[in-house]
Amino acid sequence: LEWQCVGSLNHFVEDDEERPQIYALQFIQSPSYPNIDIMLTSAHDSVYLWTVENNNEESCSSESPNARQKKFLSLSSIQFSHLDDASQTYQFGGPRNPENELYVFDACYSESNDLLAAALSDGTCRVLSLAASNVDEDESIQREQCVLS
């Protein structure tokens, strides 16, 4: 068995002071986005949905000319924020998190009910319905937009 990398995806730009850590990754099939292969990832305070497509451009890898290269295009990103003023003043993570930044520790999608759940560093679990949402690029998600929080 020989493994071949067919694509890669970065969650940072060159100007980023610190490269984000990826805590969640899942391939999903959502009834809200039929006929689209989707990859879910999370980094920092956001969950990202990417379309997975064949890259029709010529492969740059001479090692695997027959591998079907993939490209990942942004479908949407969901940025989470603190739910209320109390969670903004209470410092989660203590001295390890002096800026009280919010992080997505895990994210998972359930195909049976088209829900996306995210576990956050403030001790909350935010559950969103992909079926009920029109999540625009870089939208910040608040409590009233969650199915459960």
Image: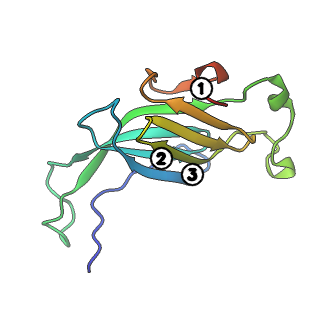
Element type at marker 3? loop
List x then y, in percent, for residue 120.
67, 42
Q: Dot 1: within a 10 Å radius of its alpha carbon, few (fewer than 14), some, or many (20 or more) residues? A: some
Horizontal side, residue 86 vs residue 143: left or right: right
- Residue 62 visible in image: yes
First along the sequence among labels 3 and 1: 3
Residues marked 3 and 1 touching at CB (< 8 Å): no
Three-letter code, disc 1: Cys
Q: Which residue is mark 3?
A: 19
| Residue drawn at point x = 67 percent, y = 29 percent | 81
- CA separation in Å, label 2 and label 1: 19 Å
| Residue drawn at point x = 72 percent, y = 29 percent | 82
Farthest residue toward the bottom? 1
- CA separation in Å, label 3 and label 2: 15 Å
Horizontal side, residue 103 vs residue 69: left or right: right
| Residue drawn at point x = 21 percent, y = 65 percent | 61
- CA separation in Å, label 3 and label 1: 28 Å
Total label count?
Answer: 3
List x then y, in percent, for residue 98.
82, 44
List x then y, in percent, for residue 85.
82, 23
Q: Which residue is mark 1?
A: 146
Q: Dot 2: within a 10 Å radius of its alpha carbon, few (fewer than 14), some, or many (20 or more) residues? A: many
First along the sequence among labels 2 and 1: 2
What quarter of the picture does the C terminus occupy?
top right
Q: Which residue is mark 2?
A: 41
List x then y, in percent, for residue 45.
61, 39
What mark, if any, has residue 107 been given in the picture?
Answer: none
Element type at marker 2? strand
